[in-house]
């Protein structure tokens, strides 16, 4: 599936199709969803972002017919019987949801990108091109590349989706 920053709605549609075939959301594993075989169900899925789950938050969703299925840090996936009114019904609340995630990724994205640039510059200017120190330095650079990809890409994904929604909202 595509990932929350780029295609959370597409992921939710895929989960809906799988639930109709009896593949139900059980959890997450290795950056993917974990499914288990069960009775086919007509379910809608939705995603929300929040740092802390409190009683009022969960009760609001439950009263609206939505059940928490999965939480991965600040990302929460809910399910409800097909046709249940959506969690977010207007573009402004959808934009706010995306803004929240964009801000959550902004600082880690900037830090990892700046550290990566600094490590690359220092590698060229200072670190000798041999030995254990250089090997460890390269391992550090690889780690920073991974950290940068997993923070910068979601940051821009949320930022772009938010901008597109704002443009669509302005045309109305």
Image (cartoon, grey):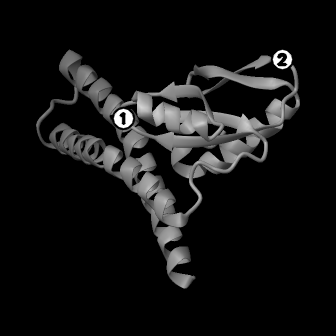
The answer to whether residue 143 is left or right of residue 133 is right
Q: Residues within 10 Å of mark 2 (few under 14, many from 20)?
A: few
Residue 61 at x, y = what percent? 55, 38
Q: Residue 110: x and y, percent? A: 26, 48
Depth check: give the residue in front, 165 or 110.
165
Q: Residue at x 67, y 42 (%)?
A: 11
Looking at the rendering, which quadrant does residue 127 occupy?
Answer: top left
Labelled disc at residue 73: none
Question: Front-most of 156 and 53?
Answer: 53
- Comes first in the chain, label 2 or label 1: 2
User: SS of the residue at dot 1?
Assistant: loop
* Residue 42 appears in the rendering: yes
* Left or right placement of residue 151 versus residue 64 in this view: left
For the residues labelled 2 and 1, the Cα–Cα distance comes to 31 Å
Vertical position of residue 26 compared to residue 153: above or below: above
Does any portion of residue 3 appear in the rendered image? no
Q: Which mark is residue 51?
A: 1
Please indicate whether residue 17 sits to the left or right of residue 6 in the image: right
Residue under the image location 61 percent in, 20 percent down: 27
Q: Residue furthest front?
A: 63
Which part of the image, by quadrant, shows the C terminus?
bottom right
Front in this rendered view, residue 124 or 152: 152
On screen, residue 5 above or below 27: below
Q: Quadrant of the N terminus?
A: top right
Disc 2 secondary structure class: loop
Q: Position of residue 120 (x, y in %)?
A: 24, 42
For label 2, the residue is: 38
Q: Residues within 10 Å of mark 1 (few under 14, many from 20)?
A: few
Residue 141 percent across, percent down from the top left: 30, 33
Q: Residue furthest left?
A: 126
Nearer to the camera, 4 or 121: 4
């Amino acid at each position: 599936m595509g990932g929350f920053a780029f295609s959370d709605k597409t992921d939710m549609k895929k989960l809906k199709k799988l639930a109709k075939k009896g593949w139900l959301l059980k959890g997450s594993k290795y950056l993917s969803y974990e499914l288990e075989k069960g009775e086919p169900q007509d379910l809608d899925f939705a995603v929300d972002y929040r740092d802390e789950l409190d009683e009022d938050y969960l009760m609001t969703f439950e009263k609206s017919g939505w059940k928490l299925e999965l939480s991965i840090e600040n990302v929460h996936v809910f399910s409800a019987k097909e046709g249940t009114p959506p969690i977010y019904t207007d573009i402004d609340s959808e934009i706010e949801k995306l803004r929240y995630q964009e801000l959550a990724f902004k600082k880690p994205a900037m830090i990892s990108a700046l550290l990566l640039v600094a490590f690359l510059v220092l590698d060229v200017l200072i670190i000798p091109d041999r030995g254990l120190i250089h090997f460890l330095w390269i391992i550090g650079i690889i780690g920073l590349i991974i950290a940068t990809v997993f923070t910068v890409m979601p940051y821009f994904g949320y930022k772009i989706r938010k901008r597109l929604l704002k443009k669509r909202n302005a045309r109305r």
